[in-house]
Image (spheres, rainbow, N blue to C red):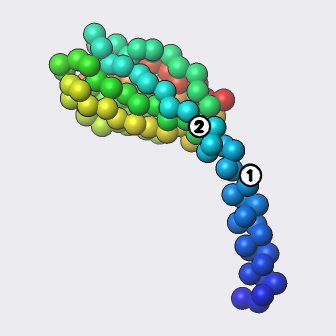
Amino acid sequence: MSLIMRRGFLASVIAGMVVFSPFVANAETHQVSIEGFSFMPASLEVSAGDTIVFTNLDSAPHTATALDGSFDTGRLSKGQSGEITISSAGSYDFKCNFHGSMTGQIVAN
């Protein structure tokens, strides 16, 4: 690789870091409780790049699983938390795999 090509590559990497660094710096963490066989809140508006922490407060196990397969906390027993990050804008419907009537929605801008 020539010196000019290496400099061009390095410049593009640095430019990418500058473009995406505000995105990472502004990411937020949101909390969703699982209690009484419900997600609280059941509807959540976030930004792409944000993290959502699901915490099970019920004695029964639960999951938070996207219907489109984009995320799954896995089995959460009482007191356990699962964390997911929403990578892109869109609407994400989710449910508990153990209790199909437990549903929610995340809308990411």
Does residue 80 appear in this view?
yes
Q: Residues within 10 Å of mark 2 (few under 14, many from 20)?
A: some
Residue at 78% x, 78% y is: 7
Quadrant of the rendered image containing residue 10: bottom right
Q: Nearer the viewer, residue 21 or 12?
A: 21
Extreme residue in the bottom direction = 2
Residue type, numbered disc 2: Ala
Q: Earlier along the polypeptide chain: callout 2 or callout 1?
A: 1
Compared with residue 23, is residue 107 higher up or lower down, i.e. above or below?
above
Amino acid type shown at disc 1: Val
Q: Quadrant of residue 45?
A: top right
Separation of disc 2 and disc 1 at Cα?
14 Å
User: Observer-nearest residue: 54 or 103?
Assistant: 54
The answer to whether residue 90 is left or right of residue 16 is left
* Mark 1 residue crowding within 10 angstroms, few (<14) / some (14–19) / many (20+): few
In the picture, measured across the screen, residue 63 lies left or right of residue 8, that is left
* Percent x, y of residue 62: 27, 25
Look at the picture and state if 18 lies above or below 29: below
Residue at the (66%, 43%) spot, across then down = 23
In the depicted structure, whether residue 15 falls above or below residue 49: below
Please, what secondary structure does the residue beneath circle 1 have?
Answer: helix
Residue beneath disc 1: 19
Residue, far top: 36
Image x and y of residue 101, in percent: 33, 14
Quadrant for the C terminus, please.
top right
Q: Which residue is mark 2?
A: 27
Relative side of 31 to 28, left or right: left
